[in-house]
Amino acid sequence: MNVLVTGSSRGIGRAIAVRLAAHGGTVVINYLQNEDKAEQTAELVRAAGAQALVVQANVRDERDLKRLADALPSYEAVIHNAAIGVLKPWDKIRTNQWDLTMESSVRPMWLLSKLVGDRLVEGGSIIGLSSLGSRRHVPGYAAMGAAKGALEALTRQLAVELSPRRVRVNTVCGGLVDTDALNYFPDKEGLIKTANALTPLGRIGQPDDIAKAVELLLLPQASWITGQVLVADGGWSII
């Protein structure tokens, strides 16, 4: 399985790349700045059974995205994981910070899907990564929540427009996951405590919890699932 995972040098992106490596083929590992972390992911991918190709690219730059799309002649799956955003109250967000969030979170899903074009094989998949801030209030999450909500809407649009090619488009919406991103929240410990208390399964997520959900959508058993947002949050959203 040839797959491309944006933002895969660490965290959830790394977990997705390593889990999908068990299916063989080649995994394209994308990073923005930290080449050492990306090479560590590549080593894990190779150990899991796939070839690894490391590509530096800024997902906000169309030329970089074109180079990323051209990394392999064909893909079975493209996973849109990369995201950079601002965590501030709505009235403290600067215009350039709002634009940064949209340009790095939702726009790449549309543009990279377009640039990959016919390299995505018939029957292939596009998968986005969202979060519960797309549908419920999270302090300081106005920009990111709007971007993730747009990504979920784009999922439905692309699912219909790519259906003639039998390309499926879905998104995984994760609950609170233990990654470096939590360090940017003003009350990290309080957020984790609340999530643990309110999650029916009793814990916050790990990166591999999201990777498993992505893998699930790529299995043959999911061949009739498209245009959906799969929530993987330990049940937090139903409380």
Image (spheres, helix red, strand yellow):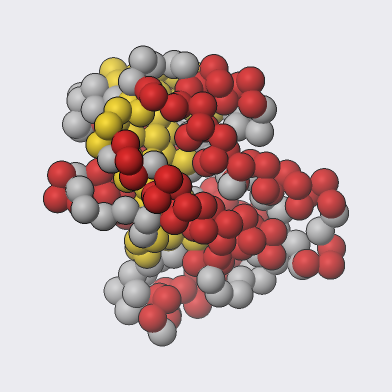
Observer-nearest of 65 and 202: 65
- 157 lies left or right of 95: left
The structure residue drawn at horizontal position 48% and vertical position 42%, both measured from the top left corner, is 81
Observer-nearest of 122 and 151: 122
Observer-nearest of 199 and 3: 3
- 105 lies left or right of 212: right
Q: Which residue lies furthest to the bottom in this view?
A: 239
| Residue 3, percent from left and from top | 34, 29
Whether residue 176 can be seen here? no
Where 103 sits versus 199, above or below? above
The structure residue drawn at horizontal position 54% and vertical position 48%, both measured from the top left corner, is 180
| Residue 172, percent from left and from top | 39, 55
Where 65 sits versus 156, above or below? above
The structure residue drawn at horizontal position 44% and vertical position 27%, both measured from the top left corner, is 117
Where 3 sits versus 203, above or below? above
User: For the N terminus, which image quadrant?
Assistant: top left
| Residue 88, percent from left and from top | 75, 62
Query: How many numbered circles does the render carry?
Result: 0
Observer-nearest of 101 and 208: 101
